[in-house]
Image: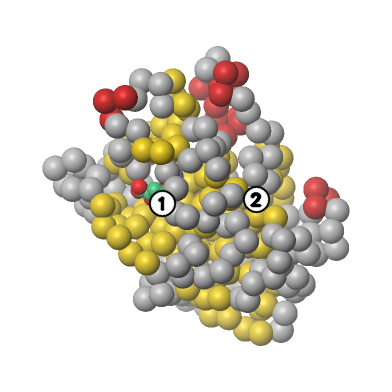
Amino acid sequence: MSIKIDTRYSSHPEDFKSYATTEIRDKFLINEIFVPNQITGTYTMEDRLIVGGIHPVDQSLKLETIAQLKAENFLDRREIGIINVGASTTIDVDGEVVTLGHKEALYLGKGIKNVVFHPSTDGETLLYFNSAPAHTSYPTRKITQADAEIVTLGSLENSNHRTIYKLLVNSVVDTCQLQMGMTELKPGSVWNTMPAHTHDRRMEAYFYFDLREGNVVSHFMGQPDETRHIFLKNHQAIISPAWSIHSGAGTSNYTFIWGMAGENMDYGDMDSVKPSELR
Ligand SMILES: O=C[C@H](O)[C@@H](O)CC(=O)C(=O)O
Ligand SMILES: [Zn+2]
C-alpha cells in the first residue's frame, strides 16, 4: 500500500508572527503519525525532511516510493532513521532480517531498495521515522540503548530533569545529515529543552509519546523574542524551522524523539537562549 503523504511548505519568521492557532496547527503540527496498516509521511520543505510513522497491524508494509521523490525507490537519494516506540519487531532490509527492540534505532542509508516492516508478535508495532536527502551510502546500523551517547540534564527543582539518548549522532553512527535521538523526562519534570535554543544550520522535528491518557504538551515555537504555542497530544509531531525555538511543557512527564536535518553534524551547535530573554 502506498504511503499516505502530506506536503508542507517552509515559512518566513515575519509571516509566522501573524499566524493564529489554526494556521500554526495546519502548517506545523502533524496530527496523525500512526494509522493502522499504513505508512504515513509528511514531506516538509524545511530541509526536505520526511516525518512519519509505520504501523503494521495484521499485514506487512513495504517502504514504497512517493510521487514527490521522482525516484524508483524511496531510498535512492535518501537516508532514513527509524525509532521503535512499540513492541519488538522485525524489518526486512534487502533480504536481511533486523530485529528492532523498544526504543532502539535503525539507520538505513542511500541505495537500499527493499524495506518491509512486519507486525510484531509481542504487541503494537509503532515505528517513527525521519528521512533526509543523502549524498552517499553509509552502512545499515542498529543502535541500542547501550550504543547511545547518554546525558542527563536539568533538575527536579527546575522541572526539567531529563535523560537525552543520542542515537543517530556522529559520535555513534555515520549519517549524511540526519541526527536523531530520544529524551525522557523524569517523573515530576515537565519542561523539555528549557533553556531553549535555535540552530540556524538545522531544522528539527519533535514527536511526543509516552504521554499518559488525558495529558497534553504545550509546545513553544517562534523566534526567541516572538514565541507562540500549540497543544499536542500523545503520538503527534511538530515541525520546527531553523529560526524557531522548540521547547515544551507537559501536564505530566513524557518522552519525545527529536530529529534534525541541515548542515553541521555537531550536535552541540546550538545558540542557547536564556529563559529571561524569551518573549
Ligand atoms: O537540538 C537538540 C534538540 O533540540 C534536543 O536534543 C533537545 C532536547 O532533547 C532537550 O533539551 O530536552
Ligand atoms: Zn534543537
Q: Name which residue lies at 56% across and 69% down.
A: 174
- Could you tell whether 158 is left or right of 24 in the image? left
Residue lying farthest bottom? Answer: 96
Q: Nearer the viewer, residue 171 or 53?
A: 171
Q: Name which residue lies at 69% across and 60% down.
A: 134
Question: Circle 1 — which element?
Answer: loop
Q: Nearer the viewer, residue 248 or 236?
A: 248
How packed is label 1: few (under 14 Cα within 10 Å), some, or many (20 or more)?
few
Tag 2 residue? 50
Whichever of callouts 2 and 1 sits on the residue coming sooner in the sequence is 2
Q: Nearer the viewer, residue 61 or 144?
A: 144
Instruction: Classify the position of the C terminus by image quarter.
Output: top left
Q: Quadrant of residue 127?
A: bottom right
Give how far across and how far down residue 262 sits, in percent.
60, 48
Q: Name which residue lies at 38% across and 34% down.
A: 218
Residue lying farthest left? Answer: 157
Residue 201's label in the rendered image is none
Give how far across and how far down residue 260 sits, in percent.
54, 50
- Could you tell whether 38 is left or right of 249 in the image? right
Nearer the observer: mark 2 or 1; the answer is 1
Q: Nearer the viewer, residue 225 or 265?
A: 265
Q: Quadrant of residue 27?
A: top right
Tag 1 residue? 268
Mark 2: C-beta under 8 Å from nearest atom of ligand 2: no
- Could you tell whether 146 is left or right of 115 in the image? left
Give how far across and how far down residue 135 sits, in percent.
72, 61
Whether label 2 touches label 1, CB < 8 Å: no
